[in-house]
Amino acid sequence: MVDIKLESVNTLNKNKIGIFDSGIGGVTVLKEIVKLLPNEEYIYYSDSKNNPYGDKKDDEIKLICEKITNHLLEKNCKIIVIACNTASAKCANYLREKYRDIMFVAIEPAYKMVYDYAYENPTLVMATKGTIESERFNLLLKKYDNHKTYLLPCVGLANLIEEGDNEKIVSYLQENLRKYKGNVKNVVLGCTHYPLVQSQIRDVLGEVTFFNRCV
């Protein structure tokens, strides 16, 4: 879920909005922000080298995110959007403590939207292993649990999306999702990469309602 309530911020000597993700997935977030703030200047940092974050240890993710933050600050960013669910879950509070003068916008899986709009329906949460195991997501799940929720750590899916091999993506989805066909009505796309293959997911699961961001 992306809670995009950004306003233009006048920070001395800083005039850009920085957005980063572990690859191309964060472009889905960037597009929504540009719709809201079309007159801002943006820097998008695609960290495909370290993709995916969801399979890494917490300390490693923090080090990666800190290096990217420093790079974006050098480029005069006044706001930094963490367009990665895993990085948001593992590092948002850490980065806010370390860089107190910078606004960080973090995202999280859109599970609350299920609570708000489709509580009665069986739900599948697709996310990285790191996101599903994170304290932040489990607090979210505990608070809004509809008690009809399946959690699926999609190990390797973000990598396949980065590679762009549709045949491999379809094979992966068929193998991992077919048991949920007819059993779920809601699908939470808990990684910014996953909306890029939403149509392929629907081909396997049938008619489901997707929840991936709040704008």
Image (spheres, rainbow, N blue to C red):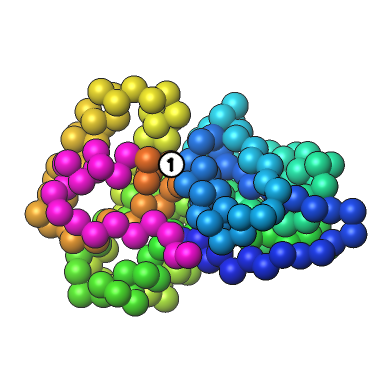
User: Which amino acid type is shown beneath numbered disc 1?
Assistant: His
Point out the stretch of residues depicted in magenta.
197-215
Towards the viewer: 155 or 163: 163
Q: Which residue is mark 1?
A: 193
Q: Nearer the viewer, residue 91 or 6?
A: 6
Q: Quadrant of residue 209?
A: bottom left
Q: Residue at x 13, y 57 (%)?
A: 183
Estimate the x, y position of residue 85 in percent, counting from the top left.
Answer: 51, 52
Left or right, 99 with reference to 160:
right
* Name of the residue lying farthest toward the front: 39
As drawn, 98 above or below 194: below
Instruction: Identify the image quadrant of residue 159.
Output: top left
Instruction: Tell whether 205 sits left or right of 8.
Output: left
Mark 1: few, some, or many residues within 10 Å (few <14, many ≥20)?
many
- Relative image position of residue 12 (x, y in whole percent): 90, 59
Q: Residue furthest right?
A: 12
Q: Residue furthest left?
A: 182
At which x and y percent is residue 48? Answer: 56, 29
Q: Does the stretch in magenta take in 162?
A: no
Give me the residue at 36% from left, 52% from top: 189
Kindly tell me whether residue 98 is visible in this rendering.
Answer: no
The x, y position of residue 96, in whole percent, is: 73, 61
Please tell me how many numbered marks the rendered image carries. 1
Question: Going 9% across and 54% down the picture, which residue do you hit?
Answer: 182
Q: Left or right? Give the position of 42 relative to 168.
A: right
Q: Residue 204 in magenta?
A: yes
- Secondary element at image label 1: loop
Q: Residue at x 59, y 26 (%)?
A: 49
Asked whether residue 82 is in view, the answer is yes
Q: Is 171 positioned to the left or the right of 151 in the image?
A: left
